[in-house]
Image (tube, rainbow, N blue to C red):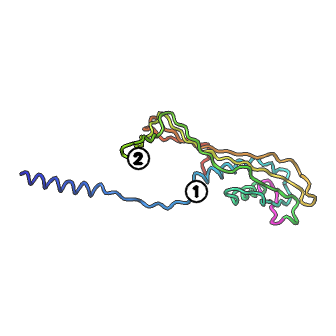
Amino acid sequence: MIMQRAGACVVLLCLLTGLTGCGVARETLPERSAMEQLLISTAADRAVDALPVEGLAGKKVFIDDSRLECLDKGYVVQRIRQAVVENGAYPAAEREGSDVTLEVASGALSVDKRNYLLGIPEIAVPMPFAGGSLGLPEISILKIVSYTGEAKLVFTAAETATNGLLYEVPVCRGDVLTAYWSVLQFFGPYEWSNMPEEE
C-alpha cells in the first residue's frame, strides 16, 4: 500500500514538472516603439498646424530643410509640404525658380517620460552573510507614468530673389500627452491621452 502511494506521488510529481516547464517566447521588435513614433509625429502635426501659411497662397514655395535635424525628418517635411499645398501654394523642387524659400529648423522633437509614485519604491536590502542583496518589491498606493511628446519648429519665410524676410513667422510648438495610472497595484493600469484617434 505504501509502495503504491509512493509510486502515485512520483507519477504526479512528474506530471506537474512537465506541466510547469518554462519557455521563452522570442520577440522581434524595432528599436523605437509605436508609442514614441506616434507621440513625436502628433507633436509635429500640432507644431505645423500653428504655421501661418496663408500669405503663401499662389506662390511657388521651396522648403529648405537643410537645418532640420530631428527624428522623423521625412514626416515633418511632408507635413509642411501638405500645409503649403492645402493653403493654395505650390511646392518647388529647387530653390531656383521659386518665389519663397521656407526654411525650417527644430528646437525640440522628442519624448519625455515622467514617473510619479505614492508608496514605497523597490528597495535592495543587503544580505551580509549571503554576499548579495534581496530586492523588496515596490508597494504603490498610486502610480502614474506619463509620456509627453514635444515639438518646437522655427521657420523663416524669405523672398527667394532678394533673400529678404517675407513676413514674421512665430515659433511653432506642439505637444501631446499619454499617461497610465494604477491604484493599489491591483486596479489598472488605466490610460488617458489627448492623442487623436485616427479615423
Region in magenta: 85-94
State the residue position of label 1: 32
- Taking the spot 84% from the left edge, 54% from the top edge, the residue there is 57
Q: Nearer the viewer, mark 2 or mark 1?
A: 2
Q: Residue at x 48, y 38 (%)?
A: 121
What residue type is disc 1 on?
Answer: Arg
Q: Is residue 199 visible?
A: no
Seen from the viewer's position, the closer of residues 152 and 86 is 152
Q: Is residue 177 above or below residue 3?
A: above
Which residue is tagged 2?
132
Q: Position of residue 126 (x, y in %)?
A: 42, 41
Is residue 142 within the magenta segment? Answer: no
What secondary structure is marked by label 1?
loop
Please report contact status of discs 2 and 1: CB closer than 8 Å, yes or no: no
Residue 74 image position (x, y, % from top left)? 70, 60
Q: Residue furthest left?
A: 1
- Residue 89, image x, y percentages: 82, 57
Say above or below: 45 vs 31.
above
Q: CA distance from mark 2 to mark 1?
A: 34 Å
**Label 1 neighbour load within 10 Å: few <14, some 14-19, many 20+:** few
The residue located at (30%, 54%) in the rendering is: 20
- Is residue 155 shown left or right of residue 43? right
In this orientation, which residue lies closer to the viewer: 84 or 38?
38
Work out which residue is located at the far right of the displayed protein and give it: 162
Dot 2: within a 10 Å radius of its alpha carbon, few (fewer than 14), some, or many (20 or more) residues?
few
